[in-house]
Image: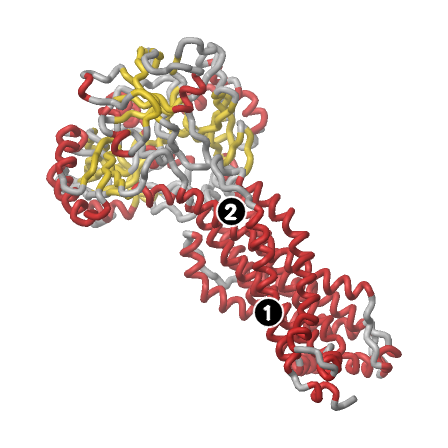
Amino acid sequence: MIRYQIRLILRNFKRQKGSFFINMAGLSVAFACVILISIWVKDELSVDKFHKNDQQLYQVLQNQQSGDQIITQGWTPDMLARTLAEEMPEVEMAAAVTPSSFFGKFALSTGGDDIIKAAGQFAGKDFFKMFSYGLVQGNAGQVLTDKNAIVISKKLAMALFNTTENVIGRTVTWQLLNFKKEVVVSGIFNGIPKNSSTQFDFVLPFEAWLSLSKEIGRGIQWGNNAPLTFLLLHKGTNVDQFNHKLAGFMKTKIAGSTDVLFAVRYSSEYLHGKYENGIQSGGKIEYIRLFLIVALFILLIAGINFMNLSTAQASRRFKEVGIKKVMGSKRRALVLQFMGEAVAISVLALFLSFALVALFLPQFNQITGKHLSLSFHAGFILPVFIFSLITGMLSGIYPALYLSGFNILNILKGESSKSFNELLARKGLVVFQFSISVILIVVMLVTYKQIEFVRNKNLGYQKDNVLFFSKEGNIAQKQEAFLSEIRKIPGVIDASTMGGNLLGSFSTTYGVGWEGKDPNTDIRFEAIPVDYHLLETMKIQMKEGRSFSDKYGDEANKIILNEAAVKVMGLKHPIGQTIQFWGQEKQVIGVVKNFNFQSLHSAIAPAIIRLDPGKTLNVMVRIDHAREKQTLASLKKLYDDFNHGYPFDFQFMDAAYQALYVSDQRVSSLSRYFAGLGIFISCLGLFGLATFAAEQRSKEIGIRKVNGAKVSEVMAMLNKDFVKWVAVAFVIATPVAWYGMNLWLEDFAYRTSLSWWIFVLAGFLALVIALLTVSWHSYRAATRNPIDALRYE
């Protein structure tokens, strides 16, 4: 019996080649999309979940009041981790970590001239006991107890010593800016897994960070924030009760402090790390939800195609159903037959989708920045196979019930069911299908428009033709001489140094006072140390006053504010006024126009620019684009002369700026691909429906042509229904797309507008695509010889 059913299914597939291949193409593409998105989602959900202490591992965040806003940050006081471990019984272990992103790369050497740049971080002594980073040599509880120790990765060990054997006890010299320290290798760990949100090559003891802080004159006190604080809580700890205790902890250390500490699961921060006014409000989890919805939409479109084509071609199967019913077939048997056909198509499409995934996975990895692979194991094959069966059954259930429900008398009379429910179902599904297509087109247009807005926005400075690199080695010790030599290079327009690089917050402070300040209000300011020529190099525009200049003697007691700082201070005439900055009086000599020194996801914060060349980290160089190649060669030679053995590791400002929005660019790229696939599948369905519509009306077309109807009139008649469906889909999709895109754009402090033309263009594109899809069949039907349609009448 089963063999007979299989033969029957294959015979029907052969007889209905057109609809079979359309369904196969639509479902296989949809399954490929679902599989790609699923393995990407699985990878995203696995980030930071590999630690064996995942359930107990927490990070401390703090809410800080700044004016009328609450800012959530991970930076905490240096002594917080140690103090919480001592005073909070819920804490089993704690570690302060100053991450690699805080410094950039260190310079490492083993005594020779060769210098290797590597990412390092400082961490508390229990770091390797709390986190599962695969320590393969050394004792996890001891490798970070000596402040003159270093723990390196296997890869770094090979780069430094060409071996991982007998490395423990060997010396390494690390250098950051003009600070140099010789340390001893105390441990080796495996490479950091790809699904770790933090990547580093070596770890130094946190005690070394405290020593470095003292050397650079940075105060170690409760009011200064630098490291991240991680906790390992005892099993069974009630986190809500612990956070209630933690909320008032800072008040016990700083009288009148308004800072509120709270702990969150470390592995949740990657996906849920966005906070608005002190409340968790999303993060990367929003992208996961978005693409899961996209995958569902694409699968729905393919399923709708199957249902529509199956019901549209019902007239071809009247005789088959009628004969089987006359011969005694029950409805249940017919339902099983038609459901079997649907499931067979779904399973075949699944196997074809594997080939599509293998073909397009490299391109998908390039877009997403991942290293995903297709693994055929029971944990993968079984779920997707079950999923394909369910998809086949859900897609085939309506056609099966519809076809098996024909009345025998109607079949024998040659009449088909033209009920209102059938009309509503088929046309309603097409409308729903094209509503999704319109939404996908809007998503594609809006994300592209926002990325272009980010790319071209006036940032308040000119990022083009600017490169930057770390100030380290002899450059830090001979900064003035180095900058003087750079400015002599042909093609260099100007050069300077600054703290940070205008691509993110560098250093913030509440230690600012001015006449008329409310003593109960704390406002956080960005504190930007610069050298002479920085404003000129970056072409930051002055609103009033002047820039720093050595023509006026010592400028150490002078500062420059941005417009946002002037506004929050309420200064009507800021030039010449005196403010208190870290307990010292500073005179305002200038006000610059607002400029973005963080991503456009954040509003421009109040900033204080101070002349402090010794606290700058990066050299900023503006060059002439027309002489770029020669200028870079001269810069490298000068760099090598000052820092022999150091690699000239530089970045162009515009490229680094674009990297801030890599997640948004990936969303934009993926939205284009998925919108195109969704539209492609919709067009497959329309193509099939147009074929059947033309066949069903072939006699009507023949009569109209005999009576003088023109080709254009016949085409208009056949296309009219499809135009109506797209128009209704546009009306339904527009408010849904507007709401969804408005929510997405709210994540940007500076964003493009949702212009009306975007929605009109989306509707127009959907209409054009639909017409191009069906017009070929309409033209063929309209130009066919009417005798062919009427010869049997």
Q: Earlier in the sequence, mark 1 or mark 2?
A: 2
138 or 241: nearer the viewer = 241
Which residue appears at 22% of the width and 43% of the height?
Answer: 624
Type of colouring: secondary structure
Across and down, in percent, residue 494 comes to: 21, 35
Which residue appears at 48% of the width and 14% of the height?
Answer: 521
Which residue appears at 23% of the width and 43% of the height?
Answer: 649
Q: Residue furthest left?
A: 641
Residue of label 1: 773
- Residue 528's place in the image compared with 666, above or below, is above
What amino acid is found at the position of numbered circle 1 in the picture? Thr
457 or 405: nearer the viewer = 457
Q: Give the position of the C terminus as an image quadrant.
A: bottom right
- Residue 120's place in the image compared with 369, above or below, is above
Q: Dot 2 surroundings within 10 Å: few (below 14), some, or many (20 or more)?
A: some
Across and down, in percent, residue 733 comes to: 64, 52
Q: Dot 1 surroundings within 10 Å: few (below 14), some, or many (20 or more)?
A: many
719 or 87: nearer the viewer = 719
Q: Residue furthest front?
A: 708
Please tell me whether mark 1 or mark 2 is closer to you in this view: 1
Residue of label 2: 45
